[in-house]
Amino acid sequence: MHPNPRRIIPVVLFVVVFGVALWWLFVGRAQAEPDTLSASGTVEAVEVIIAPEISGRVVEVLAGEGDRVTAGQDLIRLDDSLVQAQIEQAEAALAAVEAQRDAAQANYQLLRAGAQADQIDAAAEAVRAAEANVAAAEAQLAQLQAGARSADIAAAEAVIAQAAAQLKIAQDTHDKTMECVTVTSPGGSQQEVCPGLGAREEQARAALNAAQGAYDAAQARLSQLRAGATKNELDAARARVEAAQAQRDMAQAQLDLLMSGARDEQLAAAEAQVEAAQAQVEAAQATLDTLRVQLARFTLPAPADGVILARAIEPGEVALPGATLLQLGRLDDLTITVFIPEDRYGEIQLGQPATVTADSFPGETFSASVTRIADRSEFTPRNVQTAEGRRTTVFAIKLAVENRDGKLKPGMPTDVDFGNE
């Protein structure tokens, strides 16, 4: 059976049209459309090494691999207990020298301003009181040196007579009140026993004891007056006179100083004390500031926004100066490096804009610009003689990529379109 020619013709036409379409898609369209320049590369980030300036035991690690951090965020803390204690001591020392400086300044200002009226009045009153104390001490000494007067002895004898009369009355009252019996012991000794003492008996006994004490004191006083002052009493009186005179002289000197005002050498000495105290304050403040700077080194902050790429330390370990503890990738400074054939090298200019696409964000583009064009080719054979060989020579092109939303991450594969025609 022979095929029908009418059925063959449509099939042939379909094959011809389909072939023409494929040719246009792969060949004709490429010849008609502009030859755009594009290349592929990987997102790269500037890596920052986080390392301590000093050694210390790690207390906290506040970020791990893949964590996003912001500038100034604390990442690692070292043990700072010793420096904290030193700071407390330095603060106490600073407070002490500041108090000394303030006292020196107050004294200097007081000397410069001179005495106030109320200060002079108070000093004059102190002089008068001291003079009165001297007079009283001198009078007491003179009395001891002169001995007792006859009138003093007569008065003391009268006191004894009165005390004796009071003692007799108390003794009679006591004897009448007490109801006592004499008891003879088996050994022959006798003892007075007063059973059942009541309130009246107790009062009588107390009155008798008091009268006896008054009489004894009067007798002692008369004996002292007749004997005169002892050497110890005279020495003590003289010492009281000397102490009162010294107090008076000091009060008078203070009054004279207030009345005359401070001398130039006193002002100079007071000013020198202020300057010396201020120098001590500055030295103490410098010590405290130094310790605070050292304290800041025990905390390692993030120098910029970014993502932690690697972590090489754990709490409890000892960090050494300059040792890499964390690696930070800066997300605000992303770059892409692509390689352009030698025959397209002349189409690239510094600052030239480009469009970046990533498989992770289909349909979305990112802006980039050329920041560096290599001046030396790579992957080039020793002897390149043919045009085909020259096309294997490539140049590295570095682009800065905008990453405002933070979507692009280091290591992402991307395509770069330079938009050349």
Image (cartoon, rainbow, N blue to C red):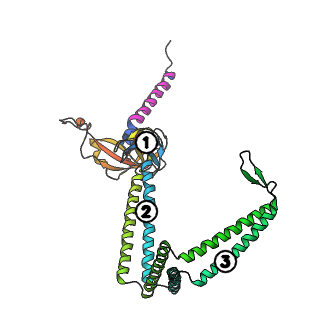
Return the residue at label 1. Answer: 58
Residues rendered magenta in the picture = 7-26
Q: Amino acid at mark 3?
A: Val
Q: Secondary structure at mark 2?
A: helix
Q: Amino acid at mark 1?
A: Val
Left or right, residue 222 beside residue 400 = right
Placement of 185 over or under 113, stated as above or below = above
Residue 172 in picture, x, y percent from top left: 77, 67
Circle nearer the viewer, 3 or 1: 3
Q: CA distance from mark 3 to mark 1?
A: 91 Å
Please tell me which residue lies in front, 9 or 348: 348
Relative image position of residue 295 (x, y in whole percent): 42, 52
- The percent position of residue 359, horizontal first and vertical second, equals 46, 38
Question: Residue at label 3?
Answer: 159
Q: Residue at x 33, y 46 (%)?
A: 398
Q: Secondary structure at mark 3?
A: helix
| Disc 2 from disc 1: Cα separation | 30 Å
Residue at 74% x, 47% y is 185
Task: State the mark number for residue 40.
Answer: none
